[in-house]
Amino acid sequence: MPPADRSQRRLRSSIGAALARGGRVAPLRDRALFAATALVVLLVVQFALGLTSLLSAAVTFTAVPFPSGFPATPVGQFLGTFLLYPWPFYVASAVVLVLVRPASSGQELPVVLVRGALAGAVGTAALVVVGAVPGTLLSLEGGTWANLALYLTSIPLSRGLGLTAVLLVGCVLAWLWLREPGASAEGASASTADVEADEAAPSAVDGTDASWPEAEGQEAAVRSSATGAGARRAPEQTVAPAAAPTPVPRRAPRPDQGDHSRYAPPEDR
């Protein structure tokens, strides 16, 4: 096979292997385990942030009634930061990672990051949708629609960006922890083996063998060696000229061979 066709075949094989790895769908168990691991990382970070807020509020705690009720207490703020407010984000991102755009440890890291960012975007949209309910209630109680605007724009977007960043970190940690050792090396070796097999197989276009340059070189060497041997043997093989045919001697006819006059009847006198 010519070098140009060989390079094109190698490129097509590499692209096909990459698409196959990116489009491979992992089993449900692997997808659920990957999403659970990423969300556990997110929950741990949120728990640490909520606990830090709780300790800070406990230091400045005063035994006076809170005008906003339980959500304004230190425990209410902790639960709101950790569980009550971001739960739509958790549910939506888990659905995306498991069912809509599955992510698993068998995929490439850029694919995992893209799908994790998509899950974060869907989770942020879920915060906007769910936030419309408390924003509307607070706007009706306060007589102004500023609360609704905040619950639809700045509050969900700011929280969604932070949660998405932590979710991406969780996806990377889950990918590093759940992937099998040597999986990338096996994929690379399999891709290389496929390319070599394609190069070794006969071409379906021109019907020539993949080792076309080598075969042609060997054939040329055989022809040249045969020509050289024939040239060396030419002086030895001298062809004798063809002998001229030997004439067959013909006997001269006898004088009386064609004369039959002696057999003629005698003449009348």
Image: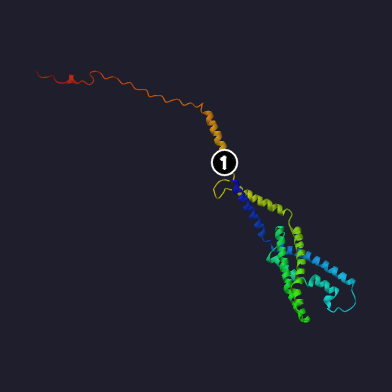
Q: Is residue 221 above or below residue 254?
A: below
The answer to which image quadrant residue 168 occupies is bottom right
Residue 195 shows in this picture: yes
The answer to which image quadrant residue 228 occupies is top right
The answer to which image quadrant residue 56 occupies is bottom right
**Residue located at (61% from left, 48% from top):** 6
- Please tell me whether mark 1 sits on a helix, a strand or a loop: helix
Q: Nearer the viewer, residue 133 or 13?
A: 133
Reading the image, the residue beneath label 1 is 216
Numbered disc total = 1
Q: Nearer the viewer, residue 124 or 78?
A: 124
Kind of residue sitting beneath label 1: Glu
Q: Residues within 10 Å of mark 1 (few under 14, many from 20)?
A: few
Q: Position of residue 196 (x, y in %)?
A: 63, 48
**Residue located at (60% from left, 48% from top):** 4
Q: Is residue 8 above or below residue 251?
A: below
Q: Is residue 19 above or below residue 154?
A: above
Residue 94 shows in this picture: no
Q: Nearer the viewer, residue 23 or 118?
A: 118
**Residue located at (54% from left, 31% from top):** 229
Q: Position of residue 18 (x, y in %)?
A: 66, 56
Q: Residue furthest left?
A: 269
